Image: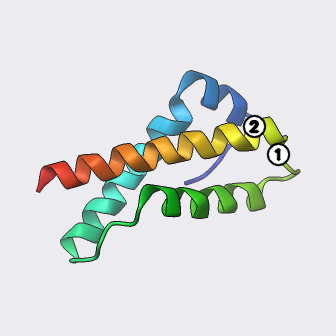
Amino acid sequence: MNVDYSALEDKILDGTFRTELEEELTIGFRAMRLAGDPLPLPSYYASQIAEIVNRAAPAPLRAELAYEVYQEILAACESARATVLGEG
């Protein structure tokens, strides 16, 4: 996922960050499932993604924004995982 850090806060507020990530995760989780791999727990995967997003930021994210980013990532992981598990 490419993160536009200049628009990150707006994308968090309007829900596009979560929606875009959920779409990407759903595709990835489907591929994992088709390959016979177990789907990761949402909290585990969300913490890994949040770490990548935070590390790649041009400047440290404010604590409140970092928290919101994690919450949005976690929600996207939970939803994508549930979607893929519900398909089988």
Q: Residue at x 62, y 46 (%)?
A: 70
In the rendered image of this protein, does residue 69 appear above or below residue 29?
above
Q: Amino acid at mark 2?
A: Leu
In the rendered image of this protein, does residue 39 appear above or below residue 10?
below
Colouring chosen for the image of the structure = rainbow
Q: Amino acid at mark 1?
A: Leu
User: Which residue appears farthest toward the bottom when viewing the image?
Assistant: 36
- Taking the image as shown, residue 15 lies to the left or right of residue 5, namely left
Instruction: Give the SS element for disc 2.
Output: helix
Whether the residues at callouts 2 and 1 have beta carbons within 8 Å, the answer is: yes
- Percent of width and height locating residue 45: 50, 62
Evaluate whether residue 22 shows in this view.
Answer: yes
**Image-quadrant location for residue 69:** top right
Q: Residue at x 64, y 55 (%)?
A: 50
32 or 58: nearer the viewer? 32
- Percent of width and height locating residue 86: 17, 49
Query: In this figure, which residue is indicated by the disc labeled 2?
Result: 65
- Percent of width and height locating residue 80: 34, 48
**Image-quadrant location for residue 11:** top right
Quadrant into which the C terminus falls: bottom left
**For mark 1, does the 10 Å Cα neighbourhood hold few (<14), some (14 to 19), or many (20 or more) residues?**
some
Instruction: Give the SS element for disc 1.
Output: loop
Evaluate whether residue 5 shows in this view.
Answer: no
In the rendered image of this protein, does residue 62 appear above or below residue 33?
above
How many dots with numbers?
Answer: 2
Query: In this figure, which residue is indicated by the disc labeled 1?
Result: 61
